[in-house]
Image (spheres, grey):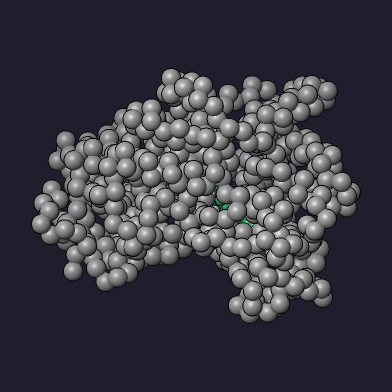
Amino acid sequence: AVAHDPSAHPGQFGTDYDAVVIGAGFSGLAMLHHLREIGLRTIVLEGEEDLGGTWWVNRYPGVRTDSEYSYYSFSFSKEVRDEWTWSERYPSGPEVLAYLRFVADRLDLRKDIRFDSRVQSATYDEDRNLWLVQLQDGQSVTTHYLVSAMGVLSQPILPDIPGIESFRGEVHHTAQWPREGVDLAGKRVGLIGLGASGIQVVPVVAPLAGEFFVFQRTPNYVVETTNSPVSEADMQWLREHYDEVYEQAANHPFGVAMQPAEHGALEVDAQRRREIFESKWNEGGFHFANECFNDLATNHESSELASEFIRSKIREIVRDPATAELLSPRGYSFNGKRVPTGHGYYDAFNLEHVHLIDTQSTPISAITPAGVRVGDTEYPLDVLIFATGFDAMTGTLTKIDIVGRGGRTLRDKWQQDGLKSNLGINANGFPNFFMSLGPQTPYSNLIVPIQLGAQWLQRALRWAQEHDLDYFEATPESEEWWRQETERTGRATVMYTEGKKAKAWFLGENVPGKPEEFQVYMGGGQVYQAYCRELEADDYAALRHR
Ligand code: N01
């Protein structure tokens, strides 16, 4: 059986489709639009019942972007830019989802997306130079190009805590939040996990819950900010300047529309440093992370100065000194983990019924039918929220069988040879397979590499059409070079320090058994894009073709 309309014209390669894109989030929509533009008969297969990807499944209380509205959108469609209006500086999850629906409708993308179509496996047929994509419902399609747009933080993980199945109350992972919502009013709520997700949950659930138990293993450096409405004048300005805003984001190491700082933290005296920290703290969020000094991610001493500034802010905000101390990270420094934005995070701990439970000194020993046990103390709960993160970057790609040349899966390749890809775009052994945001792509505001990646692939496949090529595969040399480059740049950051590491997903440390390797490229988004342009200028020499 085939999952396409048999009356439609077949693709130009004699397969059902020229391109199959897996996933209908930001990546899948951008890929569909750009591949259709070069005449490829493309379909998106989406496992969920609607589009949105991350923004469809993450419905937890408090979900919103950590990036500001002005650079959290595509630049390629003038219609979308002119007609869409953001309402908040940090758009909420539902608003981002509405944006993606608007994009899909305005660009007429829905007609080429099949929902409830979860891919089980994709197998490369060497004799016919095509991919056979098998869906969970038993249907299958053939395609010439296979494109993963499955997302980088889309494979949720639950911790391995004894008794986790036994809890009698309600249990929810933030990334699998029920569509109908969860009634938390007056309930005894527990939260495990304080990364960017848990940190958004805290201030929204705190005023709702009857009792709120926040189980903290590793404290984070939260950069507080304030949200505010976007005025019509703001939107007008943005519409007139969008190309410049996008350009600025594309030239920034972390994909944000900000001016990189010119000085290191050690180049100014203590008083000036404090003034700069203070003024950027007041601007909020990523402004503090990106605009104070240019070495907070690469110089330990500088990063430690930022760490101490944030600890001083925690002491200012949190009234109980013991709670403030517990919330203050020690043992790793600012930028050692992905920096989360806070919307009243620290202040929530001033509420009487919000309890911070230290599970670093005394770990969670079990989850019981009644609640969570820490050491010998049991905390009875009605609802338990897991904000425990994801098998990031590779999880979606290794969960299903992507079977390349010689019957080898991507999972086996990475397990046996280490994480390898050519610029996170493709992999040796997997001809005509491409990834949006594959592993080893930049750690960044992701809209930038998503859009630029779709545009890069559009140009590459157009070039292949023009040169009558039907085969693209990363060379082993290109992968080896990129692995070394990714490791070299990663190790030059404060994320990597022997004996001082924070268990972070960008090193794979958050998944038991996952080898420690840089999952993301830390050398800067703009540097990465220059490498992508070089590959193109070099007539794709790092790709084998025939
Ligand atoms: O997941 P995380 P996340 N016992 O892996 C804890 C993006 N994002 O979903 O640090 C106790 O960061 C773990 O503790 P520890 C963003 O890129 C973006 O929050 O290992 N605790 C940690 O606190 C982000 O980086 C946005 O000690 C356990 C937490 O679970 C990425 O998604 C919003 C535990 C996991 O944190 C992932 O963020 C949200 C255990 N056994 C997310 N196991 C926006 O931009 C794990 N933990 C809006």
Q: Where is residue 482 in the image (x, y as percent from the top left)?
A: 45, 44
Indicate the quadrant where residue 460 lies.
Answer: top left
Q: Where is residue 546 in the image (x, y as percent from the top left)?
A: 19, 46
Q: Position of residue 521 (x, y in %)?
A: 51, 43
Q: Is residue 394 left or right of residue 337?
A: left
Indicate the quadrant where residue 205 lies.
Answer: bottom right
On the rendering, which quadrant does ligand 1 occupy? bottom right
Instruction: Please name the residue shown 49% across and 60% down the image.
Output: 179
Q: In this view, does 543 lie to the left or right of 213?
A: left
Disc tally is 0
Instruction: Please name the residue shown 65% across and 42% down the image.
Output: 341
Instruction: Please name the residue shown 31% across and 38% down the image.
Output: 106
Q: Where is residue 487 in the image (x, y as percent from the top left)?
A: 54, 46
| 27 lies above or below 309 | below
Instruction: Please name the residue shown 58% across and 41% down the image.
Output: 66
Is residue 160 in sight in this rendering?
yes
In terms of depth relative to the viewer, which is nearer, 250 or 432? 250
Q: Residue furthest right?
A: 321
| 82 lies above or below 88 | above
Q: Which quarter shows the N terminus?
A: bottom left
Is residue 501 in sight in this rendering?
no
